[in-house]
Amino acid sequence: MSTSTNLNDVNLEAVAGLAGKVQESPEVADTVWQATVTWDGAFRSSAQVRDFAPLESDEPVGLGGTDTAPNPVEQLLGALGNCLAVGYAANASAAGIEIRSLSIDLAGDLNLKTFLGLEPEGNAGYQGIKVDVHLDADATPEQLATLHEAVVGTSPVGHTLQRPVPVDIRLV
């Protein structure tokens, strides 16, 4: 196992520095993240996050879109997978585990009846999400199990999806 400060291309000094700041001043941990979404016509929209290029969204042709970009429920799966990937990279690096390869397959079961207005009292969201993590790393099965538990136990997107979160949607 490698123990460099950049194991898995993760800047461990930066992560440790942030953890130190939070320990010294717990209020530093309270952050706000933002995005602004603009409708671009039909079922196309784009999300502006910080100074990055807009994140495009569209629906597949079968749902009335033009299939120019992933749709929001696909992006949600991607957000969960990306969050888990960050967790594996951070936690593996902190534990001195070198990752040789990591891929995450996600699938969600979604019933379109409520979205289409055919079952107004139903659930328009995912009924369930399944995640398969394919991790090849320089670690024992026990270390990988501990790593997996740490990642699942600290994933902000995973926690958001698994727990009730107040959402206040207002027309202003």
Image: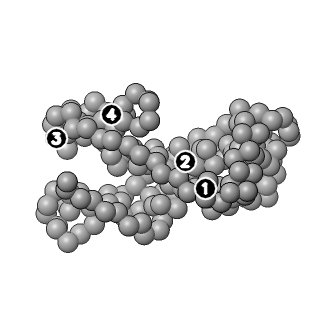
Of residue 48 and residue 112, the one placed in the foreground of this image is: 48
x 60%, y 55%: residue: 29
* Disc 2 packing (10 Å; few <14; some 14–19; many ≥20): some
Query: Where residue 39 appears, x then y in whole percent?
Result: 21, 38
- At x 77%, y 33%, the residue is 6
Badge 3: residue crowd in 10 Å (few <14, some 14–19, many ≥20): few
What percent of the width, then of the height, locates residue 7?
Answer: 77, 36
Q: Earlier in the sequence, mark 2 or mark 3?
A: 3
Q: Label 3 is placed on what type of residue?
A: Gly
The residue singled out by tag 3 in the image is: 64
Q: Is residue 37 above or below residue 144?
A: above
Position of 127 compared to 2: left or right? Answer: left
Q: Is residue 111 something that shows in the picture? A: no
Sequence-earlier tag: 4 or 1: 1
Q: Residue at x 64, y 55 (%)?
A: 151
Q: Which amino acid is tagged 4?
A: Glu
Q: Quadrant of the C terminus?
A: bottom left
The residue tagged with tag 1: helix, strand or loop? Answer: helix
Residue linked to disc 1: 29
Instruction: Specify the amino acid type for callout 1.
Output: Ala
Q: Nearer the viewer, residue 108 or 160?
A: 160
Q: Are marks 2 and 4 in contact (CB under 8 Å)?
A: no
For the residues marked 2 and 1, what is the alpha-carbon distance in whole angstroms?
17 Å
Q: Please identify, in this view, whether the residue under mark 4 or under mark 3 is nearer the observer.
A: 4
Mark 3 or mark 1, earlier in chain: 1
Circle 4 residue: 56
> Could you give the CA–CA distance between mark 4 and mark 1, rounded to whole angstroms?
30 Å
User: Residue 143's spot in the image, x, y percent?
Assistant: 79, 55
Question: Closer to the camera: disc 2 or disc 3?
Answer: 2
Is residue 30 placed above or below 135 in the rendered structure?
Answer: below
Number of the label disc, if any, that sits on residue 83: 2
Rounded to the nearest angstrom, the CA distance separating label 2 from label 4 is 19 Å
